[in-house]
Image (tube, rainbow, N blue to C red):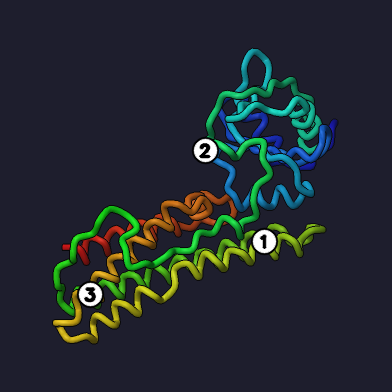
C-alpha cells in the first residue's frame, strides 16, 4: 500500500469526488513542489509555509472538481505545460494516490487576477501602512458636528479594546504557526516570516487614541479641528483594512480561530457613525 505522507492532502483529494475544493500548488519543478487541497480558501499564511517547505516556486491557485473520472484543476491564468505533471507527482508522493487529471484555465478562487503562475511576495511586502493626511482618503468629508466628552470617551474605549483584541489574536496566530512548523528544517525562515506579522500590529497603533485624548482635553472652541482629524484617521484605518490582502484573509487561516478583520471592520464602522453624527 502506498505511503501517505500528507493525510490532509489525501483527504482533500478524496473529497473532490463529491464536492468542489480549493487548491494551491507551489510548483518548484515538474516533479517537486507542494500541493494543498481543502474545502476552504488557502490563506496567505498557509501558502507562505508551503512555499518555504517547497523551497520556492511558481504558485497556482483555484478550484478543483471531479469530471468524467478526472481531477480538474482550474486556475485563473493559463497553467504551465508541466503543471499537470507536477500535481500528479505530488499527489503520488505525498498522498499515495495515482490520479488522472486535467489542468486548465477557467476559475477564480476569489483571490483575484495576478496570483496564479507568479511567485508570491513575502508577507512583509503585503502590509499596507495607513497614511494620515490633511485630506480625506475617501469621499469628501463634511465637518463633523461637535460631540460631547461622553461620546469621545466611549469612542476612545471602543477603539482601544478593538485594537488590543486584534493585536492579541495576531499574536495567537503567530504562535500557532510557529507551533505547527516546529521541527521543520526551515523553521528559522518560517519564524522570520511570522515575525513580519508585527507590522500588522503596528498599523493600528495609538495615534487615534492620542487624537481623541487631545479632543477630550481641549476647550470646546478648539475641539472641532481635532475631531475632524480623528474622523480622517478612522477613514485611513478603514482603507487599510479594506486594501490589505493579508488582513482580508486573516480570519480564514487554518491554524487558529480569530476575528481580526471582523473586529476592526465593525469597530471602525461604529466609530465613523458615532463621530460623524
Q: Is residue 159 visible?
A: yes
Residue highlighted by disc 3: 225
The span from disc 2 to disc 3 (Cα, nearest Å) is 39 Å
Query: Residue 124 appears at what percent x and percent y?
Result: 61, 60
Helix, strand or loop under label 1: helix
Looking at this view, is 202 or 228 the one in front? Answer: 228
Query: Residue 198 appears at what percent x and percent y?
Result: 57, 68
Looking at this view, is 129 or 261 the one in front? Answer: 129
Classify 10 Å Cα crowding around label 3: few (below 14), some (14-19), many (20 and above): some
Question: Which disc number belongs to residue 193?
Answer: 1
Q: Nearer the viewer, mark 2 or mark 3?
A: 3
The quarter of the picture where residue 106 lies is top right
Q: Residue at x 77, y 46 (%)?
A: 54
Classify 10 Å Cα crowding around label 1: few (below 14), some (14-19), many (20 and above): some
In the rendered view, tell whether residue 191 sits above or below residue 217.
above
Q: Earlier in the sequence, mark 3 or mark 1?
A: 1
Q: Residue at x 23, y 73 (%)?
A: 227
The span from disc 1 to disc 2 (Cα, nearest Å) is 23 Å
Helix, strand or loop under label 3: helix
Question: Which disc number belongs to residue 112?
Answer: 2
Q: Residue at x 78, y 27 (%)?
A: 82
Looking at this view, is 258 or 80 the one in front? Answer: 80
* Left or right side of 53 for 155: left
Quarter of the image with the C terminus in it: bottom left
In the rendered view, tell whether residue 175 sits above or below residue 117.
below
Query: Residue 18 appears at what percent x and percent y?
Result: 58, 24
Helix, strand or loop under label 2: loop
The span from disc 3 to disc 1 (Cα, nearest Å) is 40 Å
Q: Earlier in the sequence, mark 2 or mark 3?
A: 2
Amino acid at each position: 500500500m502506498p505511503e501517505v505522507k500528507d493525510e490532509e492532502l489525501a483527504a482533500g483529494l478524496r473529497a473532490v469526488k463529491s464536492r468542489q475544493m480549493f487548491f494551491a500548488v507551489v510548483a518548484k519543478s515538474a516533479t517537486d513542489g507542494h500541493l494543498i487541497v481543502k474545502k476552504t480558501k488557502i490563506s496567505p499564511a498557509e501558502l507562505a509555509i508551503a512555499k518555504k517547505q517547497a523551497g520556492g516556486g511558481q504558485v497556482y491557485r483555484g478550484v478543483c472538481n471531479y469530471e468524467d473520472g478526472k481531477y480538474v484543476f482550474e486556475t485563473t491564468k493559463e497553467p504551465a505545460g508541466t503543471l499537470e505533471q507536477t500535481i500528479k507527482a505530488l499527489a503520488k508522493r505525498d498522498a499515495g494516490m495515482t490520479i488522472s487529471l486535467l489542468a486548465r484555465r477557467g476559475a477564480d478562487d476569489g483571490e483575484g487576477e495576478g496570483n496564479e503562475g507568479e511567485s508570491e511576495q513575502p508577507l512583509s511586502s503585503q502590509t499596507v501602512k495607513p497614511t494620515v493626511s490633511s485630506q480625506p482618503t475617501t469621499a469628501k468629508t463634511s465637518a463633523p458636528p461637535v460631540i460631547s466628552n461622553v461620546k469621545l470617551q466611549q469612542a476612545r474605549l471602543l477603539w482601544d479594546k478593538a485594537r488590543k483584541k486584534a493585536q492579541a489574536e495576531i499574536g495567537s496566530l503567530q504562535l500557532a504557526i510557529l507551533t505547527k512548523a516546529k521541527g521543520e528544517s526551515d523553521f528559522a525562515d518560517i519564524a522570520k516570516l511570522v515575525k513580519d506579522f508585527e507590522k500588522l500590529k503596528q498599523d493600528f497603533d495609538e495615534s487615534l487614541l492620542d487624537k481623541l485624548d487631545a479632543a477630550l482635553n481641549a476647550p470646546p472652541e478648539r475641539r472641532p479641528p481635532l475631531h475632524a482629524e480623528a474622523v480622517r484617521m478612522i477613514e485611513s484605518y478603514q482603507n487599510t483594512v479594506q486594501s490589505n490582502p493579508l488582513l482580508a484573509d486573516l480570519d480564514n487561516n487554518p491554524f487558529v480561530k480569530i476575528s481580526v478583520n471582523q473586529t476592526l471592520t465593525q469597530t471602525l464602522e461604529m466609530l465613523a457613525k458615532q463621530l460623524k453624527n
